[in-house]
Image: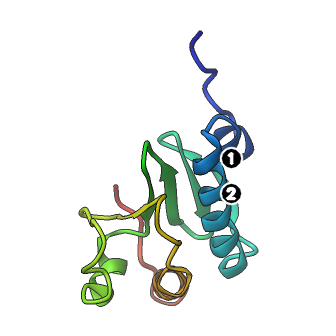
Amino acid sequence: MKKKKPENVEEYIEQLPQIAQAKIKELRAILKSLAPDAKEGLKWGKPVFESKTILFAYSAHKSHLSFIPTGPALKPFEKELTGFETKKDSVQFLFENPIPENLIRKIAEYRKKEVEEKGAKWYY
């Protein structure tokens, strides 16, 4: 039976395996605490937080979470990200490891400031 396409963040999370649900709820709570007034929704099938533009997206996969704050928001943290798999606009966190809350907070705060104070845009 094919899964129904989620229509909101809660449905997206409910369709995930238990380990992914626990980890993504943890990531979501961190991001929500940093952007409490941001609107949550789905874009490209991924949960996002938006204010003037998309602040960040995130998603769950077979063995990891992806946190997607855009490449420019990751650039200042390259040294701190050396132990993680990174892509152009995202960083991956394996389910088997604790979520690096302090690092996520720093990156998310940086991205939020860039959007709110400098007008940074989203590109994907």
Residue farthest to the front, as pictured: 96
The circle drawn on residue 62 is none
Task: Bin the neighbour count of mark 2 within 10 Å (Cα to Cα): few under 14, some 14-19, many 20 and up.
Answer: some
- The secondary structure type at the circle numbered 2 is strand
Q: How are the residues colored?
A: rainbow
Q: Is residue 29 above or below residue 117?
A: above
The spot of residue 24 in percent (x, y) is 60, 57
| 1 or 2: mark nearer the eye | 1
Q: Is residue 47 above or below residue 11?
A: below
Specify the amino acid type for callout 1.
Val
Dot placed on the residue nearer the N-terminal end, 1 or 2: 1
Residue 115 shows in this picture: no
Q: Is residue 27 above or below residue 1?
A: below
- The secondary structure type at the circle numbered 1 is helix
Q: Is residue 109 above or below residue 4?
A: below
At horizontal 60% and vertical 49% (from top left) the residue drawn is 19
At horizontal 42% and vertical 77% (from top left) the residue drawn is 120
Residue designated by label 1: 9
The reply, left or right, for residue 59 in relation to residue 41 is left
Specify the amino acid type for callout 2.
Glu
At horizontal 68% and vertical 34% (from top left) the residue drawn is 7
The reply, left or right, for residue 101 in relation to residue 8 is left
Residue designated by label 2: 40
Query: Are the residues flagged by discs 1 and 2 in contact, CB closer than 8 Å?
Result: yes
Residue 107 shows in this picture: yes
Distance Cα–Cα, label 1 vs label 2: 7 Å
Quarter holding residue 64: bottom left
